[in-house]
Amino acid sequence: MISIKNLTKYYDDFCAVDALSVDIERGQILGLLGPNGAGKTTTMRILTGYLRPSAGTIEVGDLDVVEDSLEVKRRIGYLPESAPLYPDMITYDYLLYVASIRGIRRVDRPGRIDELSELCGLAEVMHKPIKELSRGYKQRVGLAHAMMSDPEILVLDEPTAGLDPNQIVHIRSIIRRMGERKTVIFSTHILSEAEATCDRIVIINRGRIVADGSPETLGAAGLQSQLIRVSLSGASESEVVSALSGIDGVKRITSEDGRGDPASYVVATDGDLRAAVYLEIKRHDWVLLELTRERQSLEDTFRALTAEAPNDHHDGEEKE
């Protein structure tokens, strides 16, 4: 459906997107996940024809976003981070205006607006000026705008930013319903949103893809690092740290309750070393009360892949 090859974007001498390549299948809900300044918004703006790339290509079907910009835009519904609405217009009048500029036949406009009103939960505010709406309702109006022409692709930039939990749940529901018959790409830095909504997650850091997969695979197998929780009795903290640190693959040991007895520790390891930890405790004849492995979460993967150094991006366009 969408093929991105070696996409690169510079702002003066700053590289916001660095040779990014990814293929997106029809009908996927894909989340672009990354810290602020990672390159998500810039990538979306190039995909939607708002910006020109410095290098590389994006093809939508058999169309190039630069060479066939107008036709690509007809196939895409785009919701920027802040919905670009006319605040003095009545909600219904605004959507009627959007229907006209999207080329919907006059006879079909009321029916299409009614469909989107039901889908986006706008019935209560159709008669209100947009400037009087809450941020959540403004986002819903923006979604209705993006979907007005029933596009094949929806591109949503931080669609739940600044919303309360109830509003987030509603927007998430709309995205999932749209994903049943459309290709949806949305950016976020909220991990729970990506896990709850996406079929596939692409993690971007410093303009490059650092991970790509389903929420489950990224969480379970994205990294080899494991956490083992140990509770034991009959040993001092220094003895435990000294003994377990000698196991090949143990990276660090953290005491959870100081010098108590029994005491609990979290052991960070390369891979599953529960057997080695158990044998070392047995060798010292300590009393083992608990030995469990904590599963790697998407948050663990995200933090490990994006926290190598602070992102101090300061280009004029990237505002994630």
Image (cartoon, rainbow, N blue to C red):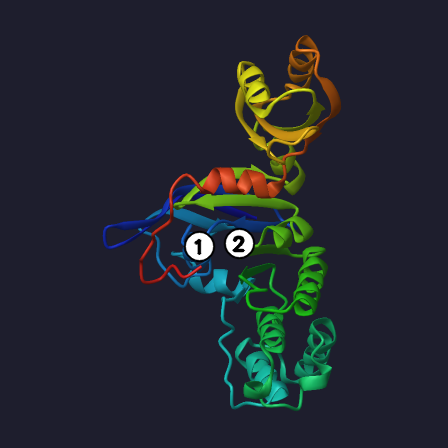
Q: Secondary structure at mark 1?
A: loop
Relative depth, front residue between 212 and 51: 212
Q: Which residue is mark 1?
A: 36
Q: Is residue 130 shown above or below 298? A: below
Report the residue at 35% width, 57% height from top.
52
Q: Can residue 61 be spotted in the picture?
A: no
Residue 51 location in percent, x, y? 37, 60
Please give the name of the residue rendered at 62% of the width and 74% of the height, measured from the top-left corner.
136
**Label 2 with label 1: CB-CB less than 8 Å:** yes
Q: Tell me the amino acid under the disc marked 2.
A: His
Query: Which residue occupies the extreme left position in the image?
Result: 13
Residue reaching furthest to the top: 283
Question: In the figure, residue 138 lies in which quadrant?
Answer: bottom right
Tell me the crowding category of disc 1: few under 14, some 14 to 19, or many 20 or more residues within 10 angstroms, Cα based: some
Residue 193 position (above or below residue 92) = above
Badge 2 or badge 1: first in the primary sequence: 1
Residue sitting at x 52%, y 73%: 83
The quarter in which the C terminus is drawn is bottom left
Write down the quadrant of residue 277 in the picture.
top right
18 versus 168 height, above or below = above
Q: CA distance from mark 2 to mark 1?
A: 7 Å
* Spot occupied by residue 4 in the image (x, y as percentages of width and height): 46, 45
Disc assigned to residue 127: none
SS at circle 2: loop
Residue to which mark 2 is pinned: 189
- Where in the figure is residue 268, as x and y percent of width and height? 57, 28
Picture residue at 57% right of the left edge, 85% below the top: 130
- Counting other residues with Cα less than 10 Å from the Cα at mark 2, is it few (<14), some (14-19), or many (20 or more)? many
The image shows residue 203, relative to residue 266, as above or below, that is below
Q: Is residue 270 visible?
A: yes
